[in-house]
Image: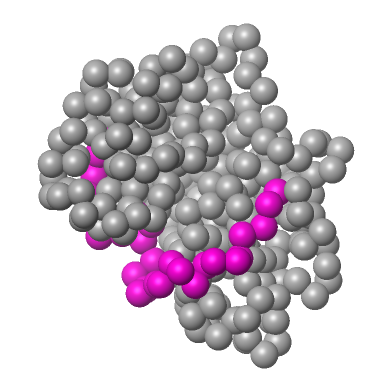
C-alpha cells in the first residue's frame, strides 16, 4: 500500500517477445530513450531479440504515461509490479541492447514453461509439501537478505551459474517436484523451461516472483522470512514493499561489480 509520503513509483516489468519483428533494436532503443527523457523517468531497460526487461521510477502520473507509450512502442501490454518510495532510487536513465534480457547462456525454448506458473495464493501449499524441492533461483547475496521458509540456497554469484548447481546437486529421478522463485519472475521464466528441457517433469515457478507474493499475501499467512533484495538504492524492501533496512552488500561479493542500480540479470 502506498504511504502518503511515498511520492515516487517504481515499476518492474519484463516480457519474452520477438522484438526483431519491430525492426532494428537500435531504432527501438532511440525511441525508448526519447520517451524516458520526455517523461522524466529514471532506471534501466534491457532490450534483446528475445524481449525486454526493465525497472524504472518516476512520479505516478508520469509512470502511467510512460507505460502507455512503451506499450505502443513494443506492441504489447506491460505487466508491471509497483512499489513506492519517498525519493527516486535510480540516478540515470539507460536503455541497453544485449543478447539476452536475463543472462543464462543456455538455449531455452520458453514454450516449455507453459503450465509451470503458480499463483501467489497457491504458493504456500506447494512449498509446504515435503516432497517439493524449493529452489531460490537468485544469487547468494540476495538469499541472505531473506527467502522462503525451507528454500535451498544455490550459493551462486550470477544467474548463469545456476545450471551447474543443478547438474551437480539435483537429479530428475530424485527431485521429482521442483518449485522455484526469484525477485520479479524473469529468471524463473527462463529457468523453469530449462529444467523441463533437461528432464525434470514437475517444475513450478512463482508467478510474479517475490514482489507479487508480498503484494498479495498478508503478513499473518506469509512464509517469507526477512526482506527482499531489489536492484536499486533501496537495497531491500520489507514485507509491505516499503524501503527495508538493508545495507550496502558490496563487501560480500568478491570480484564482482556492485550490482546496485541495475535490473536483475
> Would residue 250 be counted in the magenta stretch?
no
Q: As drawn, is 55 to the left or to the right of 27?
A: right
Instruction: Report whether 131 appears left or right of 246.
Output: right
103 vs 218: above or below: below
Number of marks: 0
Is any atom of residue 248 visible in this view? no
Q: Residue at image x 37%, y 43%?
A: 76
Q: Who's the residue at 40% across and 72% down the image?
A: 108
Q: Which coloring applies here?
A: one colour
Residue displayed at 70% across by 75% down: 177
Image quadrant in which you'd find residue 71: top left
Q: Position of residue 199 (x, y in %)?
A: 55, 85
Residue 212 to residue 48: above or below: above
Q: Is residue 250 above or below residue 265?
A: above
- Quadrant placement of the N terminus: top right
Magenta span:
94-120
Q: Position of residue 107 (x, y in %)?
A: 35, 74
* Residue 116 within the segment the image draws in magenta: yes
Q: Determine if residue 8 is in view.
A: yes
Question: Residue 129 location in percent, x, y?
Answer: 83, 67
Which residue is more in the foreground, 236 or 37? 37
Dividing the picture into quarters, in which one does residue 192 lie?
A: bottom right
Residue sitting at x 39%, y 55%: 16
- Nearest the camera: 157 or 223? 223
Instruction: Using the image as rendered, state which of residue 37 and residue 260 is in the foreground.
Output: 37
Looking at this view, name the residue that lies furthest to the right.
Answer: 220
104 left or right of 172?
left
Say which quarter of the image contains residue 89: top left
Amino acid at each position: 500500500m502506498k504511504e502518503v509520503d511515498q511520492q515516487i513509483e517504481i515499476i518492474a516489468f519484463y516480457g519474452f517477445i520477438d522484438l526483431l519483428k519491430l525492426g532494428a533494436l537500435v531504432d527501438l532503443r532511440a525511441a525508448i530513450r526519447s520517451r524516458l527523457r520526455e517523461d522524466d523517468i529514471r532506471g534501466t531497460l534491457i532490450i534483446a531479440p528475445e524481449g525486454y526487461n526493465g525497472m524504472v521510477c518516476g512520479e505516478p502520473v508520469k509512470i502511467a504515461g510512460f507505460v502507455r507509450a512503451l506499450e505502443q512502442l513494443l506492441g504489447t501490454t506491460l505487466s508491471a509490479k509497483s512499489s513506492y518510495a519517498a525519493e527516486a532510487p535510480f540516478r540515470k536513465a539507460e536503455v541497453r541492447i544485449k543478447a539476452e534480457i536475463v543472462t543464462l547462456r543456455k538455449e531455452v525454448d520458453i514454450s516449455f514453461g507453459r503450465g509451470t506458473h503458480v499463483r501467489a495464493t497457491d504458493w504456500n501449499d506447494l512449498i509446504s509439501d515435503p516432497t517439493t524441492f524449493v529452489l531460490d533461483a537468485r544469487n547468494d547475496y540476495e538469499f541472505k537478505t531473506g527467502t522462503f521458509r525451507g528454500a535451498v540456497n544455490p550459493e551462486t554469484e550470477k544467474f548463469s551459474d545456476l545450471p551447474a548447481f543443478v547438474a551437480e546437486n539435483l537429479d530428475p529421478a530424485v527431485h521429482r517436484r521442483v518449485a522455484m522463485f526469484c525477485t520479479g519472475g524473469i529468471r524463473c521464466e527462463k529457468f523453469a523451461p530449462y529444467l523441463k528441457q533437461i528432464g525434470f517433469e514437475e517444475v513450478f515457478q512463482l508467478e510474479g516472483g517475490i514482489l507479487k507474493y508480498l503484494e498479495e499475501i498478508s503478513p499473518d499467512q506469509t512464509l517469507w522470512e526477512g526482506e527482499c533484495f531489489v536492484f536499486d538504492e533501496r537495497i531491500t524492501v520489507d514485507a509491505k514493499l516499503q524501503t527495508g533496512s538493508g545495507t550496502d552488500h558490496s563487501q560480500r561479493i568478491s570480484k564482482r561489480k556492485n550490482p546496485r542500480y541495475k535490473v536483475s540479470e
